[in-house]
């Protein structure tokens, strides 16, 4: 009976007679292709071996892990519903700046940028000099497409502490200057970051600037470092950085052939 059902799944007539099964099949294919692109080989196996359930599990566990607006951009803090409710209760009773900041970070990580910006503003109203709130608010404005508004917040933080949050604020400022078309200034910041850290986020964007300047060789070196480091990185780090590694691989393929 099971063998007969599996045989039906391979026949197109089955899907014309069962449109719901067709939709499930398309969804399964979508998730399977995404898992392969992310190099989630075990997930891909589960998705193609199952029918719908594994794909749905993957959708919520991996695909929706971080919305596209903030995918690849990490901030501290958990981002689950229980923690949101806890912080909202503390804000209601205590109204402390750091509770607003923690809630804003969760919203940022979820990609709910308008809510994040409102909470960052609430935090800054209560503690205007908090360096984390200022930095994260600048990052949030940048993700909202407000690079000019983000710039003074990030510049102020980096002037006060260039290594704030292990270079993450400096990366935000470099991205801001890139968006604003100040490539030379952005290049200098990316070089400053990569001199201390091996973040794929920094190395790939530095390589992109090298390519824009017509310098493929230093770009190639940065991208090869990213790919080599990824092969030996722990699983949690590979999940976090996969958007940058994929972007780096794609850029490396587009570079002109290496000189003999």
Image (cartoon, helix red, strand yellow):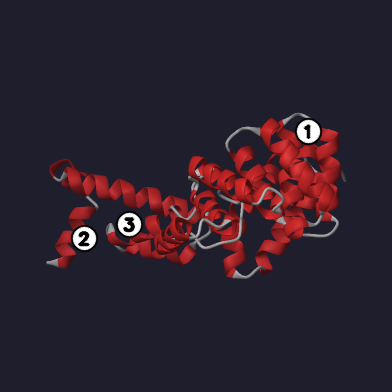
At 58% from the left and 43% from the top, the residue drawn is 121
Can residue 159 be seen here? The reply is yes
Instruction: Give the residue number, with chain letter if any, for mark 1.
Output: 212
Task: State the image quarter where residue 225 is shown.
Answer: bottom right
At 45% from the left and 67% from the top, the residue drawn is 42
Instruction: Give the residue number, with chain letter if any, for mark 3.
Output: 56
- Residue 230: x and y in percent read 67, 62
Q: Which numbered disc flags the more N-terminal residue, 1 or 2?
A: 2
> Which of the two discs, 2 and 3, sits closer to the camera?
3
Element marked by disc 2:
helix
Q: Nearer the viewer, residue 239 or 29?
A: 239
Q: Which numbered disc flags the more N-terminal residue, 1 or 3?
A: 3
Instruction: Give the residue number, with chain letter if any, for mark 2.
Output: 6
Element marked by disc 3:
helix
Can residue 215 be seen here? The reply is no
Element marked by disc 1:
helix
């Amino acid at each position: 009976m099971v063998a007969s059902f599996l045989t039906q799944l391979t026949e197109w007539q089955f899907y014309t007679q069962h449109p719901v099964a067709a939709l499930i099949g398309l969804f399964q294919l979508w998730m399977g292709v995404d898992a392969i692109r992310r190099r989630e080989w075990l997930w891909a196996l589960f998705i193609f071996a199952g029918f719908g359930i594994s794909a749905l599990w993957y959708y919520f566990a991996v695909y929706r892990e971080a919305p596209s607006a903030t995918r690849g951009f990490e901030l501290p803090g958990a981002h689950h519903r229980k923690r949101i409710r806890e912080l909202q209760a503390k804000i209601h009773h205590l109204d402390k700046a750091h509770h607003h900041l923690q809630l804003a970070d969760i919203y940022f990580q979820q990609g709910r940028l308008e809510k994040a910006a409102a909470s960052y503003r609430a935090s800054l109203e209560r503690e205007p000099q908090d360096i984390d709130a200022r930095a994260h608010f600048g990052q949030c404005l940048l993700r909202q497409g407000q690079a000019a508004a983000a710039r003074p917040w990030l510049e102020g933080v980096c002037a006060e502490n260039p290594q704030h949050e292990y270079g993450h604020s400096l990366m935000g400022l470099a991205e801001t200057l890139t968006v604003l078309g100040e490539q030379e200034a952005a290049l200098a910041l990316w070089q400053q970051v990569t001199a201390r850290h091996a973040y794929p986020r920094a190395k790939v964007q530095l390589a992109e600037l090298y390519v824009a300047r017509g310098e493929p060789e230093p770009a190639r070196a940065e991208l090869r470092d990213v790919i080599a480091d990824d092969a030996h990185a722990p699983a949690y780090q590979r999940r976090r950085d996969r958007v940058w590694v994929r972007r780096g691989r794609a850029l490396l393929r587009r570079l002109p052939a290496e000189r003999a």
